[in-house]
Amino acid sequence: MNEFELIDRHFRREARDASVRVGVGDDAAVLAPSAGAELVLAVDMMVEGRHFLPGADPEALGHKVLAVNLSDLAAMGARPRWALLALALPDDDDAWLAAFSRGLHALAGEHGVELVGGDTTRGPRNLCVTIAGEVPEGQAIRRGGANAGDDLWVSGTLGDAMLGLAALEGRVTLDAQSLADCVARLARPAPRVALGSALRGVASAMLDVSDGLTGDLGHLCAASRVGADIDLAAIPRCGALDRMLRGEARAAALAALVAGGDDYELLFAAPVANRERVAAAGRAGGVAVTRIGRIVVGSGIAVRDECGVPIDPLPRAFDHFATA
Amino acid sequence: MNEFELIDRHFRREARDASVRVGVGDDAAVLAPSAGAELVLAVDMMVEGRHFLPGADPEALGHKVLAVNLSDLAAMGARPRWALLALALPDDDDAWLAAFSRGLHALAGEHGVELVGGDTTRGPRNLCVTIAGEVPEGQAIRRGGANAGDDLWVSGTLGDAMLGLAALEGRVTLDAQSLADCVARLARPAPRVALGSALRGVASAMLDVSDGLTGDLGHLCAASRVGADIDLAAIPRCGALDRMLRGEARAAALAALVAGGDDYELLFAAPVANRERVAAAGRAGGVAVTRIGRIVVGSGIAVRDECGVPIDPLPRAFDHFATA
């Protein structure tokens, strides 16, 4: 099968959205923007052996590579609209591509996103999605808007994805239900798109937790020139992680909770006066929102344990270029 | 050096364009579109060992990975504005990154393109650029607009890049000047952005020649539901290729001319009545434009030799997924 047949078979769909003036199959896609909107663009690359193992479920990969991009747009309060897919593949395994495109198209359909173009080539497996979306002019939620005194919030629960990974690698043992839940969080993260949009005009600063709570919070604090004070007890977690935190596996649980990557929850600051509006945004977004601390003057991040004592040293955030 | 330091050092520049509301360093870029414009998006992925050899000059790679994307936008008649860069790298070689980003930024600067975001990760070397640009509403030049009777045109010269590759691989011998010229065409293609824009309202259909003349012309013909008749003698070529075509290396020269990839010239159809306007667009674009044949009723592509006889079989176009 050649490149053009591959594209035709798996990625060319009739566009359902009138904004797509030219879709897959020309030199570039041509799209009609909404009046009064700014364009929001992000790209994420997933590499076999780094972000996923050889043999990983292709349908879940199709979901995840789009999900991490949707999460980036959610973190700006933007509405995702169009995606491009660049793929390097070691072979033209038709069943792999069918499952991959099924996972991608299913999540795209859930969020009204159209796949409008891409590129395929032979090479070590590499999945790269570009997402384009829109936000009303001037309303994007940036990292740099947090102020001392703001509450610090997070959606959903943290640490599940890292716990799932640890279980898959045999480093922790989970009951069957917890294992299934945590592996699902790792394999098929749910981008918080509706919550992100609902937080426009409510949150003062936001990003998504992809590299771990303290690492990503560090970026928010640096951009906002503030510090943060977190209560460990307040960080939302699943039951398995909560039990680990109270037992012998406390160190591993702590690492998953404050430094575990791949959760794709939204971490945001909001003025104290907006607590009711944050709660309403959580309801609109269909996900729990939890107040985990506050933004403070300064530059450091403290995570206080159950006795109010800052944990020192904090487990380190995941970094793709850090030496293991 | 970690991922964030890498990004800071090599890719974060102060945006010179007021359209960039949020650039590198947030979850996504936020950009202000022009009134009355449609958005044009394309992505290209270049893989080590497939599109370039290990040890290839990183500055030239930085140029080329952006150039091939600019060429896609040129082929739509669009103005490129913003780029995203996703990189997988086997190491954090600072000198490599410095040279790569120098090549990328130099070409971006020439075309007024801002690098507004990206992603870096560890992995087999893979360079993926997404380009976003604009075209006045309804004026994108598609592949499907050619009509029987239209002239068929191409910019610049064809076959140089493939000739350069053949010389580097020791399959042909070139004089020093031809070698330098052809290798430069391969390593640092010049995207025909100004020509592409100047052809809005003039060309009826257009694409760029990345996979070879007959292969890419096949896409234009299929989209337009027409055939094409080309005069071999009219296809613009460099002196070295012209000499080869008249000697013992005719077969290799023919392959380079009609099936050689990587030239990134524009191939377009235009009504006969627009000949003067095409010539003016060539002058505006600073590149020669040559009439090489005509669009005909039907579906086949004929390349007629110096005696008017169709060449049969035609050399095959390059295909990333074809079996060698």
Image (cartoon, coloured by chain):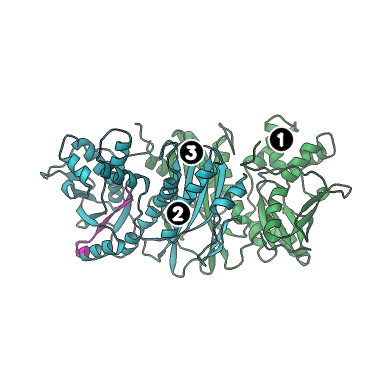
Chain colours: A green, B cyan
Q: Nearer the viewer, residue A252 or A6?
A: A252
Q: Are marks 1 and 3 in contact (CB under 8 Å)?
A: no
Task: Point out the residue furthest to the top here.
Answer: A170
Q: CA distance from mark 3 to mark 2?
A: 19 Å
Place of residue A125 in the rendered image (x, y in percent of width and height, measured from the top left): 50, 37
Task: Point out the residue furthest to the right here.
Answer: A307
Specify whether B221 is left or right of A178: left
Along the polypeptide, which appears first: circle 1 or circle 3? 3
Amino acid type at circle 2 is Ala
Q: CA distance from mark 1 to mark 3?
A: 27 Å
Confirm whether the magenta stretch covers residue B176: no
* Quadrant in the picture for the C terminus of chain B: top left
Residue range in magenta is B263-275
Residue drawn at 69 percent across, 46 percent down: A212
Q: Which residue is mark 2?
A: A15
Place of residue A3 in the rendered image (x, y in percent of width and height, measured from the top left): 39, 40
Q: Are marks 3 and 2 in contact (CB under 8 Å)?
A: no
Choose top left, top right, bottom left or bottom right for residue B122.
top right
Amino acid type at circle 1 is Leu
Task: For residue A11, say whether it is visible.
Answer: no
Specify whether B189 is left or right of A109: left
Q: Which residue is mark 1?
A: A179
Q: Which residue is mark 3?
A: A98
Task: For residue B85, say whether it is visible.
Answer: yes
